[in-house]
Image: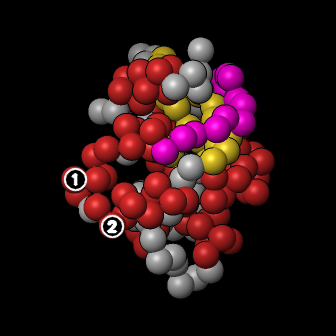
Amino acid sequence: MLLWNKTSFFVKPHALELADPIIDYLEFCLKESSIYTIKNRKKASITPEFIMEFYSHVKDINFKNFEEMLRTYVGIVDLAVIYGDNIIRKVRDIAGPTNYGDNSSLTIRGKFGRILYGEKGYVMPNTIVHASSSEEVERDFRILKKYNLID
C-alpha cells in the first residue's frame, strides 16, 4: 500500500556551502528505495522570529543550545518540499539522528557533519539539516507557510 505524503527538508545556514552535495546525496539515497519528487527547492532567509517559533521546543529542553541556535541558524537555508511514498520516515532515516555522535557516515548528518566539524564532532548542536518528523510535519508546514518560506 502506498503512503504518499510530504515532508520539509532544509540545509541550515552553517552548512549552506554543502547544500548541493547534501541534496545530491539525499536524492541518491531516495532513488535506491522509492519514487519521490522534490518541489519548491529554493534558498530562503530565516529570521530570529522564525527560529524562536520553529525551535521553541528546544528552549524548554536546553536553553543554552537554543541561544546558540539563535546565533547560528539565522540566515539563508536551502529548503525543499519532498513528496513520496512513506517519505517522512525515509528522509529522516537518510538524515540520521539529531545527535551527531549517533550517526554513521552513511547518514547526511554523519557524512557531512564530519566534513564541517571533523571527527571530533562539534561543540554545539549543529545538525546540518532539518527533516520533519511525522509528529511535527503539520506544525512545520504551518510555520513555514506563516513565514512565507513555502507556498
Q: Residue furthest bottom?
A: 120
At 63% across and 59% down in the image, what residue appears? 14
Quadrant assignment, res 36: top right
Q: How is this picture coloured?
A: secondary structure
| Residue 141 image offset from top left, x and y in percent | 45, 24
Find out whether residue 36 is within the magenta segment. Answer: yes
Q: Which residues are magenta?
A: 35-48
Mark 1 belongs to which amino acid?
Asp
The quadrant of the picture occupied by the C terminus is top right
Q: Tell me where residue 42 appears, x and y as whole percent.
A: 72, 31
Q: Secondary structure at mark 1?
A: helix
Examine the structure image and report whether residue 20 is included in the region drawn in magenta: no
Of the 4 image quadrants, the one containing the N terminus is: top left
Q: Residue at x 49, y 45 (%)?
A: 48
**What amino acid is found at the position of numbered circle 2 in the picture?**
Lys
Q: Main secondary structure of the magenta part?
A: strand
- Name the spot of residue 16 as percent of width and height, x first: 70, 53
- The residue labelled by disc 1 is 60
Q: Residue at x 54, y 41 (%)?
A: 47
- Label disc, if present, on residue 64 of the rendered structure: 2
Say which residue appears at 64% left-offset and 64% top-offset.
112
In the displayed structure, would residue 135 be above or below residue 77?
above
Q: For the residues marked 2 and 1, what is the alpha-carbon distance in whole angstroms?
A: 10 Å
Q: Is residue 20 above or below residue 80?
A: below
Answer yes or no: is residue 117 visible. Answer: yes
Q: Residue 131 versus residue 84: which sits nearer the camera?
A: 131
